[in-house]
Image (cartoon, rainbow, N blue to C red):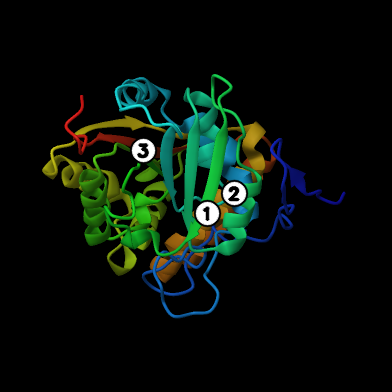
Amino acid sequence: MTEQATTTQYGGTIPAPPGSREVIPGAGPASRPGERATLRLRDTGDDEPARYAPEWLQLREPADAAARSYDLLDPLRIRLANLPRRADGLVIHDIGCGTGSMGRWLAPRLDGAQHWVLHDRDPYLLHFAAVASPRSAADGSHVTVETRRGDVARLTSDALAGASLVTASALLDVLTREEVGALAAACAGAGCPALLTLSVAGRVELTEPHPLDREITEAFNAHQRRGGLLGPDAVSVAAEAFAEHGATVRINPSPWRLGPGEAALTEQWLRGWVGAAVEERPELASRADGYLAERLEACAAGELRVVVHHSDLLALCRPADGAA
């Protein structure tokens, strides 16, 4: 049976995932140290930016939506409600927007008119994010978008001037300590809160437990830290960076909970997770092959359940104008 492309409720089509034996770009390991093959945040001089494959972003979007912490929305709504009213409503900058899943999740959960500024280095993803963006807020107010292509790791407070909110999804763990510090400084300088979701926490639970679980996890976490990237240390580093600028920081868990209904995502995640671990520690290869085969068999049989731990961070920076 041929896989069909998916059309979102907002328009725009994401290509169908590849065959089950392929690893979708975004799920697998990097092709070079210090940078994931499917994400380029920095200007390396190449003509075309590397990409998260839209197929991977499509596959993970339902799990991301289910995982994000709803408990952080109430304090965020209170802060946004206390901002001075603007004729054009809220201005929300989505950093490393990918296909725009954060906007599709968050915009319909906030009241009032919204203007989303979508940042990414990949023009293809920016195009899809704009086409597939939501049109209405929670109260029916209008939602508009614009796109900005550029290095999301180098934003300044000037670039965020007038922002009501900064958002990002699965971004912090692919930044360095310096880049997270710069992001915190930019948000603090602009006086806007930041909702930064789905950063890897470095912990995974699989049913049934296996003797290799711990070694694979440790090797994967080491792979995430290649080239000075923060990986599972990202949320704690970000919390410290925002706190140093006087922000109030809240962190909530946002785990993926994958069961038989998420078998396609689980399979891709497994292949990428084990593949990154083996790339980091090649001596695991012979044992990891059998481990992966066993886990994939359980996944196909509907017997595997996985919890992939992530964290969401809300930083309430002091308003630039001194408002409450």
Q: Are marks 1 and 2 in contact (CB under 8 Å)?
A: yes
Q: Which residue is denoted by mark 1 in the rendering?
A: 147
Which of disc 3 and disc 1 is earlier in sequence?
1
Q: Is residue 78 above or below residue 51?
A: above
Locate residue 284, reporting x and y percent: 43, 64
Q: Which sits earlier in the primary sequence, circle 2 or circle 3?
A: 2
Question: Is any atom of residue 134 visible in this view?
Answer: yes
SS category of the residue bearing label 1:
strand
In the rendered image, residue 51, in percent from the top left (x then y), is placed at: 55, 64
- Quadrant of the rendered image containing residue 133: top right
In the figure, 127 relative to 82: above or below? Answer: below
Q: Residues within 10 Å of mark 2 (few under 14, many from 20)?
A: many
The residue type indicated by label 3 comes to: Leu
Query: Three-letter amino acid code at disc 2?
Result: Ala
Q: CA distance from mark 1 to mark 3?
A: 16 Å
State which mark lies toward you, 1 or 2: 1
Q: Which residue is mark 2?
A: 129
Give how far apart the Cα atoms at labels 1 and 2 are. Answer: 9 Å
The label number, if any, that marks residue 165 in the structure image: 3
Which is nearer the N-term, disc 1 or disc 2? Answer: 2
**Relative to residue 241, is residue 54 drawn left or right?**
right
**Image coords of residue 143 (percent x, y):** 55, 34
Q: CA distance from mark 2 to mark 3?
A: 18 Å
| Quadrant of the frame with the C terminus | top left
